[in-house]
Structures are given as structure tokens and as C-alpha cells.
Image: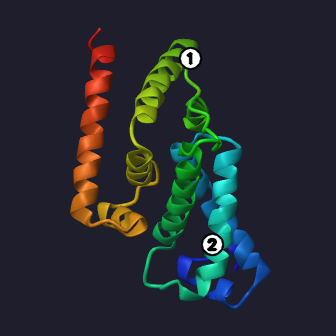
Amino acid sequence: MAAGSWSEGELVRRCREGRPEAWREMIRRFTPLAYRLSARMLGAGPEAEDAVQETFTGVHRSFATFDAQRSLAAWISTIAYHAALRRVGRAARPGGAAADPDAAAELRDEAEPGPEQRTAARETGALLDEALDRLAAQDRALLALRYREGLSDSEVAEALGMPVGTVKTRLFRAREKLRQWLAPAFEE
């Protein structure tokens, strides 16, 4: 069975056996998730990349304690979230590294329709990225996990160590803020 076709349970078992190909597969599968989450919180670039490295160092260090009944994506999201949050805290301190606020635009998935549609999509994406950047890093993480990564509310709650009700409330409030900020642009 090829590494790319392993189930999550098989991947966990092989990683616990210390198989290098299993670790490579886990990193291949979950780096995009960790990077997107980190980039949503920190902006794309070196800070997000460093947070991803911290994430997988943390995954490797604490893998023996991973509960195989949990979702691997939610567990890795938890570690990535905390790695990025530590970096957000460092950046907020005087002398800390600042995240690139414009770099999140690189994360958009753009289809290849005609030039008018591409331009409209870019403009809409830029407006959305600008609005997302105005949200707190934690709210950006919630939105990224829920809507970009497709985790359920309970998986987001597990990943971020919050009660499900808190996740639902914060998602609702973040969506409302986005709706308020973006409404004027779409009323034209």
C-alpha cells in the first residue's frame, strides 16, 4: 500500500513505529493545513513557515501522547494554532517581528475564468483579505479552520481548546463583523 493511500489510523500506527516514510507522509499531508492556518494568523512568509516548523517539531515531540481516537487534523491544528499564537504574541511586543498584512492575498485559490472574472475575483479577494486582517488573530484562525479547512464546530473547539458554544459565538460574531465591513462594497 502506497504512503499516499494510508488511512489516518494506518498513518498514525506507522508513525508510532518510527517509520520515516510515515513521517514524510504526515508532513506532506498536513503542511498545507498548518501553513494556511499560520498564514491566516501571521501573514504568508517566513513567520508562517517558522510556525509550521515549530508545529511539526511539536507534533514529533508529543506524538506518543496523541489519542488515536481524535482527529489528526484537529490535533495538528491545535499545535499549529498555538505555535502561530506564540508568534503573534512575540510580534506584538516591542521589537517583535511584524507579520506581512498583504501576504494573505497569496492564499486565495483562483480559478482560471476570463479576465473580467479574474479581476472581479481578485478585487473581492482583496476586500475579503483586508476585512479578515482587521479581525483578531484568533478569529481569523477560527474562520480558517471552519471554512477553509472544513473542520466541524466541535473539531475547531477541540483544536483551539474552546467550548463548542464559544466557537459558535465567535464564528457568528466574526461573520457579522465581516458582513458589516463588506456590505458597503457590495451594495454599489
- Nearer-N-terminus badge (2/1): 2
Q: How would you rate the neighbour count of disc 1 (Cα within 10 Å): few for under 14, some for 14-19, many for 20 or more?
A: few
Image x and y of residue 61, in percent: 65, 80
Asked if residue 32 is positioned above or below residue 129 in the image, the reply reads below
In the rendered view, does 156 fall on the left or right side of 171? right
Q: Secondary structure at mark 2?
A: helix
Quick one: quadrant of the C terminus? Answer: top left
Q: Secondary structure at mark 1?
A: loop
Report the residue at 71% width, 45% height from top.
Answer: 46
| The quadrant where residue 80 appears | bottom right
Asked if residue 104 is positioned above or below residue 141 in the image, the reply reads above
In the image, farthest residue toward the front: 94
Report the residue at 71% width, 78% height from top.
Answer: 22
Measure how far apart labels 2 and 1 are at the Cα level: 43 Å
In the image, farthest residue toward the top: 188
Q: Nearer the viewer, residue 75 or 13?
A: 75
Quick one: quadrant of the N terminus? Answer: bottom right
Please count the marks in the image: 2
Dot label at residue 58: 2
| Residue that carries the numbered disc 1 in the rendered image | 114
| The quadrant where residue 51 appears | bottom right
Image x and y of residue 128, in percent: 43, 29
Amino acid type at circle 2 is Gly
Query: Is residue 115 at least partly visible in the picture?
Result: yes
Report the residue at 67% width, 86% height from top.
Answer: 14
Report the residue at 66% width, 63% height from top.
Answer: 54
In the image, farthest residue toward the bottom: 17
In the rendered view, does 124 fall on the left or right side of 19? left
Amino acid type at circle 1 is Gly
Q: How would you rate the neighbour count of disc 2 (Cα within 10 Å): few for under 14, some for 14-19, many for 20 or more?
A: some
In the rendered view, does 4 fall on the left or right side of 124? right
Asked if residue 157 is positioned above or below residue 17 in the image, the reply reads above
